[in-house]
Structure formats: C-alpha cells, structure tokens
Amino acid sequence: MLLPLPKVLLALLLPTFLAVGGARPKVCSRDHNTTLPALLRLSSCLLANYNKGVRPVQDWRKPTTVFIDVMVYSIINVDEKNQVLTTYIWYRQCWKDELLQWDPEDFDNVTKLSIPTDSIWVPDILINEFVDVGKSPYIPYVYVQQDGDIHNYKPLQVVTACSLDIYNFPFDVQNCSLTFTSWLHTIQDINISLWRNPEKVKYDKSVFMNQGEWELLGVLPQFQQFSIEGSEYYAEMKFHVVIRRRPLFYAVSLLLPSIFLMVMDIVGFYLPPESGERVSFKITLLLGYSVFLIIVSDTLPATAIGTPLIGVYFVVCMALLVISLAETILIVRLVHKQDLQQPVPPWLRRLVLQRLATLLCLGERPTSPRLSVPTPAAKMDEGSAVGNHCSSLAGPRDLEKTPRGLGSPPPPPRDASLAVRGLLQELSTIRHFLEKRDESREVARDWLRVGSVLDRLLFRIYLLAVLAYSITLVTLWSIWQYS
C-alpha cells in the first residue's frame, strides 16, 4: 500500500530539520533558581555539560580562528655566546567558543564573565623558538563574552633561540623572530590570524621600557603556512622583533681609550730619533694597550662562528703599534753614533737626501764639505818639514856660525831644542785626532740626516694608514647606525 505524498515528504525532510536544529549554538536560558547570584548561575549554566577536551564548534568542518597579538615590554638579556634572546612580552589571544554563549537579559545583563582557564578548551599555540621556560606569572582566568568570544591575556618571559650577528658590534641591529603555531592541529582545525592592524603592531612602543641597552625598532608580523614532508598544512604567525644596541657606553669605554693610545703613539714620532726615549715610550704604549685589551676582553661579545669588527679593530691597532715600534728601532739604529761607522753610500745619499727630501718638502740643506784627510805622502812631507825646521833650530854648529847681532839673545840650549821638537810632535798628534773626530762627527751627522728623512717618510705613511683605517671604520659604523 502506497503512503500518501505529504507523509513521504515529511519523512524525507524530518532528518534535515533535525540536523539544522542541532546546529544551532547552545545558549544558556533563564534559570528558575534566582536565589543565587547572576555570575554563579551563569558559570554553572555554561560549565554544566562542557567538555574541555573537544574543540568547541557545532560543525567540525569549521576551523577555529585564533586571533593573536604581541606587545614587547622589555628586552631582558641578549646572550651572544649561546645565541639566546630573553624578552618580556604581553601576549593576547582571542577565539570563539560556540558552546559558551548566553543572553544577557536572562542573567542581570551580564555581558562578560571570567572563568578558570583550566575549565575550558584552550588552543595549543606555542612559540617554536622556545629553548627554556621563563619565569612567567600564571594567570588562571580568561574572559568570556556573551557571544562566545574568549580573551586570554597573559605576560610571558620568553627565552628563545635567535641567530645573533655581532659583526657590527656595538652598532649592531638584531632581528629575532617569535613564531606562534599550533603544535598539533592543522589549518583545517585551527587557523591563526592577526588581532590588530599590522602597521599598529609594527610601531607600537606604548608598553616598551626603553631605558636599557637595547632599543626596540619595530615588530613585524608575518603570516604563512607550512607543511612537514608534504603532509597537511599548519598555520603560523611570525613576529620579527627588531632591536638595536645603544652604542654610547661601548664607544666611551672601548673606542675612546683605544683612540687616545693611538694618538699618543702618533705624537711619539715627534721625539728626536737620536734619543733613546722614543723606544721606551713606544714600548710603554704597547704594554698599556695589551693591558687594555685584557681588561676589555670580557666586555666584547664572543661567539664560535664570528668575531665583531671592533675585535679586528683592536688587533689592527696593536699591529700598528708594533709596526711603529719596529720603525723606531730601525731609525734609532741608523742614527746611533759609532766609532767605526761607515760613511753614507753615495746612492743612499742621492736617494734620501736629495730625492726624498725634495719629495717630502723637507728643505734639506746641502751637506757641508768634509775636512780632507791628509795622505801618507803629505804626512811624510809634513814630518820632513817639521824635522828640517827643528834641525835648523837645533843645529849647534849652525847656531855658532850665525852672526850675533848687537843685543840679540843667546841661542837656546840643546835641551830646549829637543823640547820644542817633542811639542811639535804632540801638536801633530792632536791635530790628527781632531781631524778624525770631525770626520766621525760628519759621518754621524750624515746618518742622522738620512734617518730624519726616512723617519718623516715612514711617519707620513703610518699616519696615512691610520687615517684611512679610521675613516673606513667610521664610515662603516655610520652606515650601520643610520641604515
């Protein structure tokens, strides 16, 4: 027997009506027991048949969208050696719980309620870069709105791994990321979105305590999806925390003392090269710089993968001090006076005293002609002349033959003539000694002039190297500071 057509249509549409009716959100209605406070009645109504182990949606095909927001409160520590960043952030997240809804008119116009976090379902959103559990305060409650929106606010001390680049220290800028993602649920179950406008998140510094070593430049949000080995996709929200170090402390404690020592090394070139004080002065500077590096070694950041540029700067400065000391030792060796010092070679005299002196605009005066050294023949002639003179003075017979004039003194005795002869020999020896001394002094003066010209040349080369190195470093650090 065939059923009537209306009954057949009713039998077919009844399951659809039941499904639509079952999809309606659960809403707490007025409770007849009005003796209890409204908050207690509402809390009992919401959590009466609530199961916190199941995602709170009416249709399981619909993903739960979690809106998150991050505000950086403080930069606690930046550990360059272990590549770890410790920050203190204010974290906010919001999602809709379709099983926690009510009509405010049924509960004394209550529009929001704080309930324990452990009593409801909470998304498993974690930070991928976590390396340690920070000392975060525990917030046991969340706010539930009348339409089911849940607001979960909590402060977090985040200890995360970060790739820290210290090459530009102390003018370095670090970019560390905080990646929020669900540890288990795919994007079909939990989707992540940004709570506020990206521009507001980027330039929000309202809660940042900016009195420390680091300055917050901005927080850049970025949403992306990823999959593991071609499986289902996961949603993640990445916040790039960009911070910059304040370099004033390091510039005063590290750079200025080094600059002062290098300036004193340059001033040391004005000490006379013939004096031994320059060597001792530069050795003292080198020793002082070594002690300075030992003191500041703990201040410099150290990593196993790189060295900051300021460390290279210190090493180069010490190398320049060593080069300056070696140059001083060379010049002192050239101008050091020795009794057996050889004369300046003619090629070196032309190269240094003529060409280099003219090139450096030193106005070197021409060398004075040295005293001529008597040859052995001249010495024999001189000795013969002195002997003949002495013989003419001391010959007794000639003296007797010499007619005496009226009132002329008597001839000197024989002993007196011998004394005069010895005196003339002593005078000849003294003259020879003085000539040798003048010649040695002239050789020493020539080497001193050569050393002075070379010292000026090496000083200018050294000064140009220091200036070029300093300008390069200042330019690089200025670019990094204001980039």
Image: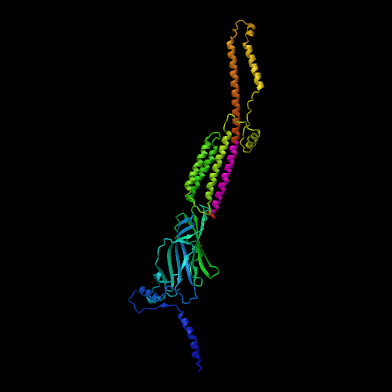
Picture layout, residue 221 above or below residue 283: below
Residue 52 vs residue 450: left or right? left
Q: What is the x, y in percent for residue 262?
A: 52, 43
Residue nearer the viewer, 320 or 28: 320
Name of the residue lying farthest toward the bottom: 1
State the residue at coordinates (43%, 68%). Answer: 152
Q: In the rendering, at what x and y percent does residue 77 appear?
A: 45, 56
Q: Is residue 360 above or below residue 216?
A: above
Q: In this rendering, is residue 135 above or below 147?
A: above
Tell me, yes or no, whether the highlighted magenta stretch contains residue 460.
yes
Q: Residue at x 43, y 77 (%)?
A: 26
On the image, the x and y values in percent for residue 126 come to: 47, 66
* Residue drawn at x 54%, y 42% as measured from the top left: 322
The region drawn magenta spans 453-480
Predominant secondary structure, magenta span? helix
Give the total of numbered labels: 0
Question: Is residue 371 a member of the stretch shown in magenta?
Answer: no
Q: Is residue 108 visible?
A: no
Residue drawn where x is 55% and y is 43% of the image: 320
In-image side of 388 versus 130 (left or right): right
